[in-house]
Amino acid sequence: DIQMTQSPSSLSASVGDRVTITCRASQDITTYLAWFQQKPGKAPKSLIYAASNLQSGVPSRFSGSGSGTDFTLTISSLQPEDFATYFCQQYKTYPITFGQGTRLDIK
Amino acid sequence: QLQLQESGPGLVKPSETLSLTCAVSDGSITSRSFSWAWIRQPPGKGLEWIATISYGGNTYYNPSLESRVTISADTSKKVFSLSLNSVTAADTAVYYCARQPQGRIKVLRGVVDFTPNYFDIWGLGTLVTVSS
């Protein structure tokens, strides 16, 4: 199985900050990488697919980059509604696997 | 806007079978453009993909659960389902159904197969507790 490792596991930041979350794959997944946002008690919401493609309706302050084994999710200017947990997911091969999540809290 | 709605018992006894259904609000379950999946999340933990069924009925399972899991679809009723047998407390989780845009087609020795894809739409999830 392809292991996905996110860092950091948790992060505190303020409204207006620029935040970067990293996801590393245990082997080359080219750009078969997606990012999700999850708020407490809610279903995950798709943000980015193919490493850098924004889902329809997702604010442009979210961006993704990377290829191969190293990927980043960047939020350019944090808004109050962005405080949530973020997951990455690889879909290069089955079984599909997820990162363990990065919890983003208000500082 | 497509909606997915999970349904099933919230409490299952150990060693019994967990059965869930996901209702697809529009007709896209019959579309060649999508596959359908189950994912779970134990309380306070991360996400675990369980299974996917593609258009045409190809099924894909997480090897960690494959011996106990079956995914199926009934397009006439616009639902797909999950069955997980011999459950234990470790199977306690929120279970999500989700849609996957169809993956790339692979043909090997005349057999059509699909690569995986991300999940673009998720249901709200249903908590299933395994306890006596």
Image (cartoon, coloured by chain):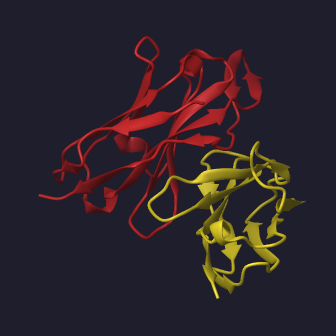
Q: Colour of chain B?
A: red
Vertical side of B128 occupied by B6: above or below: above
**Residue B20 as seen in the image, left or right of residue A60:** left
Name which quarter of the figure residue A60 lies in.
bottom right
Q: Which residue shows up at 38% across the image and 40% down it?
A: B69
**Residue that protrudes farthest toward the left in the picture:** B132
Residue A70 appears in view? yes
Total marks shown come to: 0
Which chain comes out yellow in the rendered image?
A
Residue A31 appears in view? no
Q: Nearer the viewer, residue A14 or B56?
A: A14
Quarter holding the N terminus of chain A is bottom right
**Residue that protrudes farthest toward the top in the picture:** B76
**Residue B66 as seen in the image, left or right of residue A5:** left
Q: Which residue shows up at 83% across the image and 62% down it?
A: A61
Name which quarter of the figure residue B118 lies in.
top right
Measured as percent of width and height from the top left, residue A16 is found at 79, 78
Q: Nearer the viewer, residue B26 or B31?
A: B26
**Residue A15 as seen in the image, left or right of residue A81:** right
Quarter holding the C terminus of chain A is bottom right
Vertical side of B98 occupied by B40: above or below: below
